[in-house]
Image: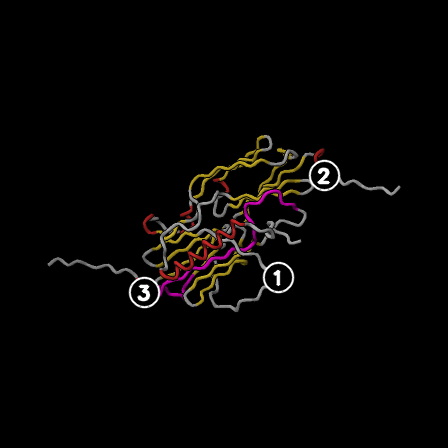
Amino acid sequence: MPIGWGVDFFDPFREFERLQEEVNRLLEMTSPFVPVRTVARATFPVINIGETNDAVYVYLFAPGVEPDKLDLSIEGNILSISGERDATKALKVEKVDPNRFYRQERFSGRFTRAVSLPESIDANQVEATYQNGIIKVRIGKREEKKARKIEVKAS
Amino acid sequence: MAERETKELATREEQAPAVRRERPMIPPVDIYETDDGLILVADMPGVTKESVEVKIEENVLQMRGEITDLPGEDVQPLYAELRGNEYFRAFTIGPEFDLDKVEASMEAGVLRIYLPKLEAEKPKKIEIKVA
């Protein structure tokens, strides 16, 4: 079984995105810069959730977000994410002139999201790390909710 | 700034993938023009400067990046908005850029590519003389 983000199942939306991309490429061939928004402004940050026997992992895909501009909080089993990203910072230009963009697809501004996590989490055991634009939040599971291996005894 | 790095832009032979690969994800891109060149910024969370590849073939700029630190096999997916472990996008570029001087850097999952304009293509200031 391949590890990763469940890449092995069919997603009709991805097919649609693909088609859109093909069309864009055709347009780009006739003119190098097509000043239209070509990728739908997606939710930010994109979230994946996974679990192991003793913890729940939340992955927030937040490239270019400064960790101090991000707030994470847990209430009950709801994880709230809020923060701000200035997408123009990555340009590394002194003064950004909005008229000089040919394309502006990257999310910019304030964001808030909330996700509900499994009931088994222990809100007191949370740690978050940030690496390569991904924030990984590990939330431990309550002792009594941890999956137990049941041994089958031979009689 | 520590992660800034200039990538080699020499063309490489495309390696035939050993296994069937899933279609790559399409990163959102900003393109911005300055007097001296063009800046292209792409969001590729999970990609490091070692796992990103930027190349120019003919007049097509290609960027490809792989997510390196995937969750371990013991992590069972519960919910996934992002599916895939590779990004790819390509743009046709005009003849006004100096392709030998293209720079690329990767920082916090954001790829930045700078395409300088050829000297002859830069805007010139026209002085108005008072007669």
Q: Quadrant of residue B51?
A: bottom right
Q: Are marks 1 and 3 on the same chain?
A: yes
Q: Nearer the viewer, residue B78 or B50?
A: B78
Residues at discs 1 and 2 in contact (Cβ within 8 Å): no
Between the residue at mark 3 and the residue at mark 2, the CA separation in whole angstroms equals 65 Å
**Quarter placement of the C terminus of chain B:** bottom left
Q: Which residue is mark 1?
A: B19
Instruction: Give the chain of mark 1.
Output: B
In the depicted structure, whether residue A69 falls above or below residue B59:
above
A153 relative position to B88: left or right? right
State which mark lies toward you, 3 or 2.
2
Q: How is the image coloured?
A: secondary structure
Residue A10 image offset from top left, x and y in percent: 58, 51
Q: Amino acid at mark 3?
A: Glu
Residue A147: assigned label: 2
Instruction: Give the chain of mark 2.
Output: A
Q: Amino acid at mark 2?
A: Ala
Residue B118: assigned label: none
Q: Are marks 3 and 2 on the same chain?
A: no
Classify mark 2: residues with Cα within 10 Å, few (<14), some (14-19) or many (20+): few
Q: Are marks 1 and 2 on the same chain?
A: no
Task: Point out the tag, 1 or 3, that comes first from the N-terminus.
Answer: 1
Q: Which residues are magenta?
A: B75-102
State which mark lies toward you, 1 or 2.
1
Mark 1: secondary structure: loop
Classify mark 1: residues with Cα within 10 Å, few (<14), some (14-19) or many (20+): few
Residue B119: assigned label: 3
